[in-house]
Amino acid sequence: MKEGTATVVKNAGSHYLLSELPVWAPFPAVLKGKVRLGGSGSTNPVAVGDRVRYSFEGEPTVLEPARIGEILDRSNYVIRRPSNLSRTSHVIAANVDGAFIVVSLYCPRIKLPFLDRILVTCEVYGVKATIVLNKADLYGEEIGEEVAAFRKIYEGAGYRVMLTSTVTGEGIEELREACRGKVNLFSGESGVGKSSIIKTLDPKLDPKVGKISSAHLQGKHTTSLYEMYPLGSPEPYGYIIDTPGLRGFGLVDLKPEEVALYFPEMLRASKGCRFTPCTHTHEPGCAVKEALDSGLISPERYNSYLGMLEEDRKFR
């Protein structure tokens, strides 16, 4: 019997593909019946990026897959609720070196509260997030001010913002270098061009590319499975975890008094608050409110924060 340790590179319900990274040689696997899942309440206790111990006799095939006997501890992960009304949660990916959150100003129009929920989740679970502002070829001089305003908000908060276009190639080489030697999560709303970016990073890859619904200017779901891809072959220089286009991103296991801790610019300012704890909503001597009034914290980010507090009260 052969035993080993491998990484989950594809999750298709109750069936998985594993590979002993950095070697890219996926093979099928299933869970043993009595695997301990650590009391996880998520809909997928085993996620792409998880490190697992496996065993098999002979060679693993679809009919005789390897058996996953243990899920190893995670260094980090990204988790969400499909909506704030949902009581279920879903682990998007585990053990990643960074997350690239792909957005577009238009087609589909960006929703800043949605982006901020993803960023807060990355902060909570120790995942370094980079914002990829895609479809730069659509942003002419007439909306240059909007691009600059967007960058000011998020670079001011402490995030790296990369401008990319799969049409002109702008920013693609910079993004490729940022992925080198790492396991990278790519996530975002439907229709922002995530799959197109992956195909442009490595033309040998073929994730499904979707179209925009002209009726609502919203993306149609294309990716339906969580899957890892190697960048470059035969020896990968990095890896990408592709995820389905998201329409909802509810926070998981975050108390109202903790939310501000995961807005980096608010955390910096809050050290000067008169009271501890401070909700940064009504207290006198609140340094966060002062920073907001002076322009050091953007009203867009602060409104996202207030929205998270309100949703928590509404759906608890």
Image: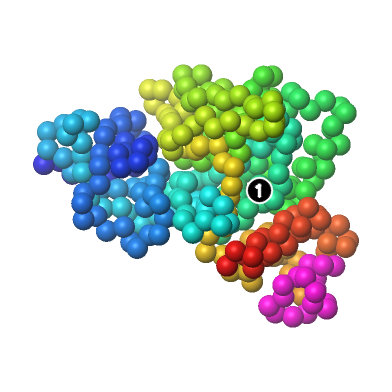
Of all residues, the one furthest to the bottom in this rendering is 275
Tell me residue 25's x, y (percent): 30, 30
Q: Which residues are magenta?
A: 274-290
Tell me residue 288's x, y (percent): 78, 67
Secondary structure under tag 1 reads helix
Q: Which residue sits at x=41%, y=23%?
A: 233
Q: Left of 100 or right of it: where is 31?
A: left
Q: Is residue 275 magenta?
A: yes
| Residue of label 1 | 114
Q: Which residue sits at x=47%, y=54%?
A: 89
Q: Is residue 19 visible?
A: no
Q: Is residue 219 visible?
A: yes
Residue closer to the observer: 181 or 291: 291
Tell me residue 248's x, y (percent): 59, 47
Mark 1: give few (<14), some (14-19) or many (20+) Cα within 10 Å.
Answer: some
What amino acid does circle 1 point to? Phe
Q: Is residue 309 magenta?
A: no
The dominant secondary structure in magenta is loop
Q: Which residue sits at x=78%, y=52%?
A: 300
Residue 16, picture quadrant: top left
Q: Classify the position of the N terminus by image quarter.
A: top left
Way the structure is coloured: rainbow
